[in-house]
Image (tube, rainbow, N blue to C red):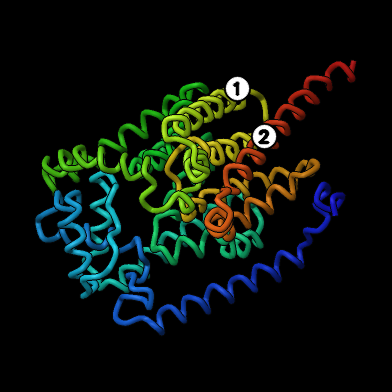
Amino acid sequence: MLAALRSGSFVTRERMRVYSLLLLVAYVATIVVLLATARGIVDTAGRPIGTDFANVYAAGKLALAGEPAQAYDWPAHHAMQKRISGRDDIPYYGWHYPPAFLLVAAALAALPYLGALFVYQAATLAAYLVVVRRIAGRPEAWLLALAFPAVFVNVTHGHNGFITAALLGGALLLLDRRPLLAGALLGCLAYKPQFGLLVPLVLAATGRWRVIAAAAATVLAIATPTWALFGADVFVAFWHSLAMTQRVILEGAPGFHKIQSIYAALRQLGVPAALANAVQMTATLAVAAALVVLWRSTAAFELKAAALLIGGVLATPYVLDYDLVVLGPAIAFLTAHGLRQGFAPWEVTSLVALWVLPLIARPIAELTAVSPTPIALLAAFALVLQRADTIRAASELLPQRAR
């Protein structure tokens, strides 16, 4: 078994196809049961269908009603969620997004709830699938990308992981061929800034100033209509809400077993907040330094891109299992490189672990108090760095051997 794990020989094309299809059948069956047993838009557990989508839809309704700043007033926001669901006992799903995301929320809120949820997930899923397929460069990639467990987690939570993955993956795909468009995609990522934490650093370290300029221009271009439509008060309300958002993260309001960061993993083990935060910051700085070195090297671009995507997840203290959709493009980059150059020991097993991770991360953390996500991500990140260094060393020896 150890030899199979080391070589990755247990992974075959037929097994990938069969397991992917079985998972897809299970996903569809679960969603059908969820919809069939719901009462209105509330499931049997008393939660809105799409759970976190309730916060997007409620914020959009407040924006359409001329009260966008109320999305950051959590009692008012919760009251709107209760009104939409027709229930007073539903849990609260908080709105933590910058004001620009109200443009998306308001557009969706013009539709009936379930219709808006379907459009939101279908459109963003399609974008994610196109990006992963383009990165992988193989027609069969769409099946693995669709069966990726993070897709199911994201759909059932009605979340925006597809957007994050499509924007980051698409930007990396276009980075050198179309830098202005890549910058525009990165600028759109401002709706979820914690996932763009390391991107400007890498861009600056490699002198990609046109990408940075395009990203900054895009942020400004989005902020302008947001200001015009919703006024300055919404920016003030967002600013005042940040302290509460920080408390939600530090205190683990969703449950530390749901948060997939190094910080949350330590907090779940009983580590004090100050020490857990210090470890998270140290890890973030170490990942940042490694990425700068990697991106300034002559390593293959697929390795750089995958490392940035994995490192981006490691660097933030607030990442949930539905956010792990962003690993889809990372797996695609690493797979494309491995199929072209050959896989090193443990790399295939690492890719399988990343693919399965969103399915098991939350249950394992809840049952054992040990989060597997930071372990799997750190191992994958280390393998990418090792791979890049091995290839660099080999390329430096080539001229000597030729002589």
Crowding around mark 2 (Cα neighbors within 10 Å: few <14, some 14 to 19, many 20+) is: some
Residue at 87% across, 50% down? 3
Q: What is the quadrant of residue 356 in the picture?
A: bottom right
Judged from the image, the secondary structure of the residue bearing numbered disc 1 is helix
**Residue type at mark 2?**
Ala
Q: Is residue 293 above or below residue 23?
A: above
Q: Earlier in the sequence, mark 1 or mark 2?
A: 1
Side of 308 relative to 340 (left or right): left
Can residue 121 be seen in the rendering of this structure?
A: yes
Tell me where residue 300 appears, x and y as whole percent.
67, 33
In the image, is residue 16 above or below residue 172?
below
- Mark number for residue 210? none
Give the percent coordinates (x, y) of residue 247: 31, 41
Q: Mark 1 is on which residue type?
A: Val
- Give me the residue at 78% from left, 20% from top: 396
Residue sitting at x 53%, y 34%: 176
Q: Residues within 10 Å of mark 1 (few under 14, many from 20)?
A: some
Mark 1–mark 2 CB contact (< 8 Å): no
Per the image, the residue denoted by label 1 is 293
Identify which residue, 54 or 112, lies in the foreground.
54
Identify which residue, 140 or 193, lies in the foreground. 193
Q: Nearer the viewer, residue 126 or 324?
A: 324
Above or below, comparing residue 142 to residue 258 in the picture: below
Q: Which mark is residue 382?
A: 2
Q: Is residue 396 left or right of residue 376?
A: right
Tell me if I can see residue 166 in this picture. Answer: no
Q: Residue furthest bottom?
A: 36
**Residue 305 in picture, x, y percent from top left:** 58, 38
Helix, strand or loop under label 2: helix
Residue placed most toward the observer, 208 or 26: 26
- Residue 24 lies left or right of residue 243; in this view the side is right
